[in-house]
Image: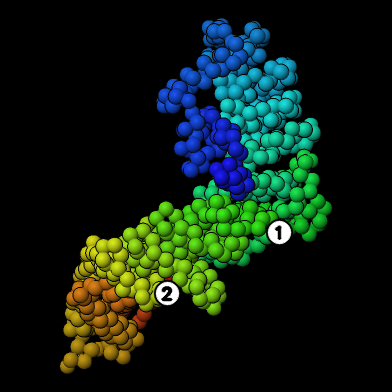
Amino acid sequence: MADEGSQQNNQITGQPLNKENSIRLVGRFGIRNADDDELDEAVSLMSLTDKEKNSTEDKIRWLMENKKKEDGIPELELDCYKELWKSINRSDWKEVKKELYRKPSAFTSQISEFYETVLHILVNFKKALGLVREIVDKVDSDSLGKADYQRDTALSIAAYVGNSEAAEMIAMKNPGLLTRTNISGDSPFHAAARFGQEETFRRLLKVATVTEMNDQSVFSGDNGATIVEYLISSSLYGLALDLLQCYPKLGRETLRQRKKILRKLTENPQGFASGCSFGFWEGLIYKAISVKKEVTVPSVETKNDDSLLLDIVDRNKENPTHGDFRARCKRQAYDIIGLLFPSIKRIHKTKLKNEQALQLVKTLCSGIFWTFPKASYALKRSVLKAATLGIREFVKEILKVYPASRMFSDDDSYNIFQLAVLHRREKVFKLIYKWGLPYKRGLSQQWVPSYLCKDQENILHLAGKCKPSSDINGAAFQMQLEMQWFKAVEKLAHPVLREERNEKEKTPREVFEKEHKKLVEDAEKWMRDTASSCMVVDALIIAMVFAAIIAVPGNNDKGIPNFRHETPFKVFVIADAAALFSSSFSLLLFVRILTSRYAEEDFLKALPKRLLLGLVTLIFSIATMLVASSSALIMLIDAVPGPKVIVRKSTIIPVTVFSALPVIFFAWSQSNLLIDILRSTYWPPIRY
């Protein structure tokens, strides 16, 4: 029975039965190719000696001793290369060249205690490219294959640092180095992919094509899947799609490979549209741009899998249409727009990456009939992580290919929608309206978000937990958002859940009140401070405009103003009255805020609306007060015997400009607050 179970597990996961081949050694950048659930296995497979290598220094020392034993190298004579190292440290390449010719053995010898050749060192410097070319031409191909203490050749180092020209030269002279791996199992392709060196990667592919590289193991099995993982980690989604197009089985030979690549995709939420944030105009541009024709759609067929297909288009340099005049014109127009409006080009690149990442998800989920055991192994952890991080597109695609994935749960029994509520991911939560209602997927599916989770809590208990967002400024807005979430989940949940008690015998409402007690206090303090500050301004305006009514500008004849028929006087009266009434109304609104009971429900609509109306009327009262003051000033300056007022441009223009400045400044300083109130109250992120 045990053997049968092992065989069945191997068929589902695609894991090799020999555990010694399932992990890789510690290399230059740590353990590679190991999932979280594989780390314990990795530790158990290490010998006692390996476990004792805790520090980086111990690991380096062990690797150096291992290199010495494997190659049978005696103690290195490094004293004779002191002058060479001095020249390298000064970046004096002419002197380096002289030192090399003074001691010709330095061309191929290992000149450092880490068993590095001079080529290992020089490929790190772009300015030493000429010297690198001369060394490559001079030494034989076998000498180019000398490795350092971590079995990295000079080609691998050039791939790590992105020295594309040097990497291409070395690979052309010794193509066999393209498949040479270091102690971590990384080939030069892995090195370039890991550090996002796209140009280097494409040049190495070009060399592989020209030299007709026969060893394709680097693009198959776990080796090939790891390259795809590295490309995804470096956000090179387009290059990953190109590889999947050339190798229809790459990354899809086993469920384990699909699982690892999908999980890697969830580690970068910014790779998807839901993880990007744009302003209003940027959002409109993002929606208007179409990139579907630029996204590679890999085939799920398995033909031509055994032949090297490296006809990958360099999208940065080659014209994809090869002669199509209209396409060339379109490309040139795009380049011109990119120069004139860099933000549009940036948005285009962002959307292209988003679409490529989504296409990767679709490709990895296609070509297989998903059953519960398969989906539970390959999709479960990635879709739950995507729900936690709010990657709506990822979750939506998984629900499409396997709708029952909504029943997956983590170690705390949280399913997709419960995680979305717990972490306040409104974009994922909105999917519940599409996938959870009875008329969409059957009556039984409505209860999926109602399953109990940790501590016997339902989804409404999770909505009652306090999870302030780092994207929201101000405790009052935080409280408003928390209340909106609770109301939205309460509206969706079955009535029975509203009175259901958890292990601590608390209902969702009681959990909400306890969890948000501190936030309510902070929100109340924020509201009171804001209202008090605005009340001071209102009081000053009322005092000023009321005094202006009593002391009407111009001489009075039996209580009748002399300028009553003049236009500036009429403007003064109307503006002064508007300032008095609006400031009084604003003052009363802020008094109403101060005397509020500050219950949780008040933060939902009542308090934000009062604050919004109070701020708007305050800005209006400031504007009308300055209009009244400007009118009085004009009457004072331009009054002539009669009595009459002759308005001059030399007076009205500077007075208008200077009176407008305070209004504009105050409105601008309060604009963010006004926009936040409007958005959170009338266009909240989640409907309730």
With 68 as the anchor, is 638 left or right in this view? left
Please tell me whether residue 404 is drawn above or below residue 150 in the rendered image: below
Residue displayed at 36% across by 75% down: 496
Q: Residue 572, can we see it?
A: no
Q: Quadrant of the C terminus?
A: bottom left
- Separation of residues labelled 2 and 1 (CA atoms): 39 Å
Please tell me whether residue 168 is drawn above or below residue 147 in the rendered image: below
Please give the residue where the numbered disc 2 appears in the rendered image.
492
Q: Quadrant of the N terminus?
A: top right
- Asked whether 264 or 345 is in front, the reply is 264
The image quadrant of residue 337 is bottom right
Please give the residue where the numbered disc 1 appears in the rendered image.
293
Across and down, in percent, residue 666 comes to: 33, 67
Residue displayed at 69% across by 17% down: 143
Which mark, by number, is residue 44? none
Kind of residue at disc 1: Lys
Across and down, in percent, residue 216 comes to: 73, 36
Q: Secondary structure at mark 1?
A: helix
**Front position among marks 2 and 1:** 2
